[in-house]
């Protein structure tokens, strides 16, 4: 169970970094960068939690999730001048987040004793929908 928490934290961090670089590519202001990072990091898990009836959603009762987004966003913004190629960095962190959050979503379904097909759907939703919301 501890490994799942580590994967979840890593997923939040890398997806918020992905959101930062997507927002910076669009030349958003600092507030816009934070909002896009938050949505990217927590959007898929929010939708998953709503679908499985886990309310309130996890980031509302565990403020550590928001703190992880805040710290990883600040770190990404601080190091953005060093990185330079936003598109390549965005794709790297997006790929990492997809893998990590797929595991988290599938594991949530397994813990709730859902059918394997539903577990795969939950993994896909968790991994993809933060980015979908970000891109919209």
Image (cartoon, grey):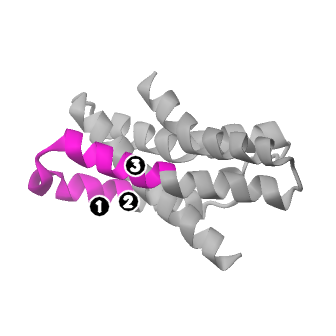
Q: Height in image: 66 above or below 131?
A: below
Give the alpha-carbon distance from disc 1 to disc 2, as whole Å: 5 Å
- SS at badge 1: helix
Give the alpha-carbon distance from disc 3 to disc 1, as whole Å: 19 Å
Q: Nearer the viewer, residue 74 or 17?
A: 17
Give the alpha-carbon distance from disc 3 to disc 2, as whole Å: 17 Å
Q: Is residue 91 visible?
A: yes
Query: In the rendering, at what x and y percent does residue 21 appear?
Result: 28, 42
Q: What residue sits 50% from the left and 54% below the top?
A: 99
The magenta-colored residue range is 72-98
Q: Circle 1 is placed at which residue position?
A: 75
Q: Is residue 116 left or right of residue 19?
A: right
Query: In the rendering, at what x and y percent does residue 124 appear?
Result: 62, 41
Q: Height in image: 94 above or below 113?
A: above
Q: Circle 2 is placed at which residue position?
A: 72
Q: Quadrant of the N terminus?
A: bottom right
Q: Main secondary structure of the magenta part?
A: helix
Q: Which mark is residue 95?
A: 3
Are the two marked residues, 1 and 2, in contact with CB atoms closer than 8 angstroms? yes
Q: Height in image: 122 above or below 6?
A: above
Q: Nearer the viewer, residue 59 or 10?
A: 10
Q: Is residue 16 visible?
A: no
Which residue sits furthest top?
Answer: 136
């Amino acid at each position: 169970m501890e490994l799942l928490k580590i994967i979840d934290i890593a997923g939040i961090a890398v997806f918020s970094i992905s959101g930062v670089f997507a927002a910076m590519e669009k030349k958003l202001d600092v507030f816009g960068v934070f909002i896009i990072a938050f949505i990217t990091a927590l959007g898929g898990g929010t939708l998953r939690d709503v679908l499985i009836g886990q309310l309130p959603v996890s980031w509302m009762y565990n403020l550590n999730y928001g703190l992880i987004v805040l710290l990883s966003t600040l770190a990404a913004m601080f190091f953005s001048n060093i990185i330079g190629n936003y598109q390549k960095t965005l794709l790297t962190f997006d790929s990492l987040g997809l893998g990590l959050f797929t595991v988290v979503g599938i594991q949530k379904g397994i813990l709730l004793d859902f059918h394997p097909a539903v577990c795969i759907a939950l993994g896909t939703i968790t991994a993809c929908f933060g980015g979908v919301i970000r891109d919209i």
